[in-house]
Structure formats: structure tokens, C-alpha cells
Image: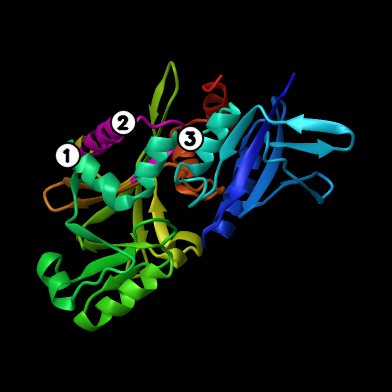
Amino acid sequence: MKRTIAIVAGGDTSEFEVSLRSAQGIYSFIDKEKYTLYIVEMHGTDWHVQLPDGTTTPVDRNDFSFRLGDTKVTFDFAYITIHGTPGEDGRLQGYFDMMHIPYSCCGVLAAALTYDKFACNQYLNKFGVSIADSLMLRRGQEISDEAVIEKIGLPCFIKPNLGGSSFGVTKVKTQEQIQPAIAKAFEEAPEVMVEAFMPGTEITCGCYKTKDKSVVFPITEVVTHNEYFDYDAKYNGQVDEITPARIPDELRDRVQKLTSAIYDILGASGIIRIDYIITEGGKVNLLEVNTTPGMTATSFIPQQVRAAGLDIKDVMTDIIENRF
């Protein structure tokens, strides 16, 4: 009997539409001979299932089920592809834990930690992972332009500490840009991160592990056409994504080994993707850890799966079956 899979998308942040695109990608990747698939769209307390005839029906949040005619449908597994809250920050993971429904990604602690960029980077730094100098502001806190320049320097990045897809991010080059950039970031999240600029080569590396295998994908080099890897670069093609990356084999091996180590340090599950900057001398610096990475047909992970000579359907099956 085929298992019934919920591909859970949407969420409560600016990444809502990006998440829906990832859901369509995952729907196309999962083997429909093995699984029955439904996309579950969430926005606030509006949870509904997209039905094959184009209509929708509400989800009963008491047991994560829905009605299909006279039949009550329950889910055997949830593939979480919400970028942002509540799917990337541990909240939905806690719900599924209480419902005893296995899911695709990290548990509550790892999800909450990686969603908080500042906390995650500081935590991993204690394990010897190199990071940029940074500071964090909570809503209501202020910092002077002079303090930013003294502690972090210019240029720097000012961005929401929570969230992704480059919403609310500013590359700040002058003192006059600092306060407007902080205000812009606070529009996206209640915490703001001020992070030193690191000149170098941006790369990203995906990884997943199951009970009997560890897979680290080929590395992608990210060459943006813009000032930095912003929304247009990510989603509107203003970037060159080169897989495998044009880096020495020794550096490739170090990045892949570090990616695997970070996976284990965090106690990650499912597919994660870790972004780095390679600075002078081949120094590997962590940017951030993504525990629900984008999964459209052109996203980094599908690219890396293809470069590894793997079938994305097999990878999806690995992720699902590993939780049973």
C-alpha cells in the first residue's frame, strides 16, 4: 500500500511564494508510483490541501487529516518545504512530533538554532568553524553609526537575523546607509544581524544522511551579476551557478568534510545546504546553514544531485524511507 505524503508549503513570511515553488519542485521529484502526494498550503491558521481537481479542502489541525468525499485521509509523512516560520524554525516540527508524524528535516532544536543565523554561527564557531565578525540587535535596541563602523567596519551586510531569500538585506557601503538598512531589516524580522563583509568566492554545498549512507553533494560556485547574491540573483537568473565549483580538489575536500561535520554537530536530518565564503589563502568561512533549502528544478540541491550523477527520485525516497 502506498504511503500518503504531505508536501507542506507556504508559511507566514515573505518567502511564501518561494515555498510554493519549492513544493511544486518536490511534487515533481517524488516517485508517484511509490507515494500518494498532496500539497498542503499553510498561511496562519488557514491550512488546506490542494486536490487534484484544482479545489482545496481544509486540514483538521487536531490530527493533520482531511476529508476526501466520505473518506478521512491521514498522512504517513510530511515533507516540509516552508522557508521561514513555522516550517524552518522548529514550530511545525514540534507539532508533527506531537502528532507522531515523521517529517523530512531537522528536529525542533536544530531547526530553531539554524533559523537564528547569529546564534547558529556563534555556536558553530565554538567548534572551530570560521565566521564573519557580527552583532545582533533586537527590536527596540539601537546602535550608532559609529559603533557599527568601529565594531564591524564598512562595507558590511545588514539583514534580518531570521528568514531568508535575501528579503530585507542591504550591503552597506557608507555611514548614511546604516540606519535605513537596519530599519529595512526590522521590517522583515524582530532581530537584525550586522555582519562584516568578506571578499572572496561564494560557494554552497548540500548534504544528507540516512541510517546507512552519508552523501555530500558536489559544490556549487555562486557568481552573482549583482552587488551580492540578492533576490534577483537567486530567483531571476542574475547569477552564474557553476557545479562543480572551480576550486582546487584539496579545498573541495575540506569543504565537503566540513559540511558533513556541521551536519553531525547540529544533529541534522534530511537535506541541508551550507553556504560559505572562501577568502584569501583558501580560508573557509561559514555564511549560514539552510535546513529547508529551495527545491525548485533550478535550485542548488537539484543541480548538485544531477552533478553527482544521482536520480532526484532516489534521493527523495531515501529521505522519506529513512524516517520509518
Q: Amino acid at mark 1?
A: Lys
Measure the C-alpha gap from mark 3 to mark 2: 16 Å
Vertical arrangement, residue 185 with respect to residue 130, above or below: below
Q: Residue furthest bottom?
A: 176
Please indicate whether residue 52 sits to the left or right of residue 273 in the image: right
The residue most toward the top is: 212
Image location of residue 269, percent across then percent down:
43, 30
Residue corresponding to mark 2: 260
Residue at the spot 68% in from the left edge and 37% down from the top edge: 62
Quarter of image, res 238: bottom left
Q: Residues within 10 Å of mark 1 (few under 14, many from 20)?
A: few
Of the numbered discs 2 and 1, the one sitting upstream in the chain is: 1
In the orientation shown, which residue stands out farthest toward the right?
70
Residue 188: percent from left, percent from top: 43, 65
Which labelled disc corresponds to residue 168?
Answer: none
Secondary element under disc 1, as helix, strand or loop, is loop
* Residue located 26% across and 31% down the image: 257
**120 or 140: nearer the viewer:** 140
- Label 1: which residue? 126
Which mark is drawn over residue 105? 3
Q: Nearer the viewer, mark 3 or mark 2?
A: 3
User: Which residue type carries mark 3?
Assistant: Cys
161 sits left or right of 6 in the view: left
Quick one: 206 or 163, which is closer to the camera? Answer: 163
Where is residue 111, by image quadrant?
top left
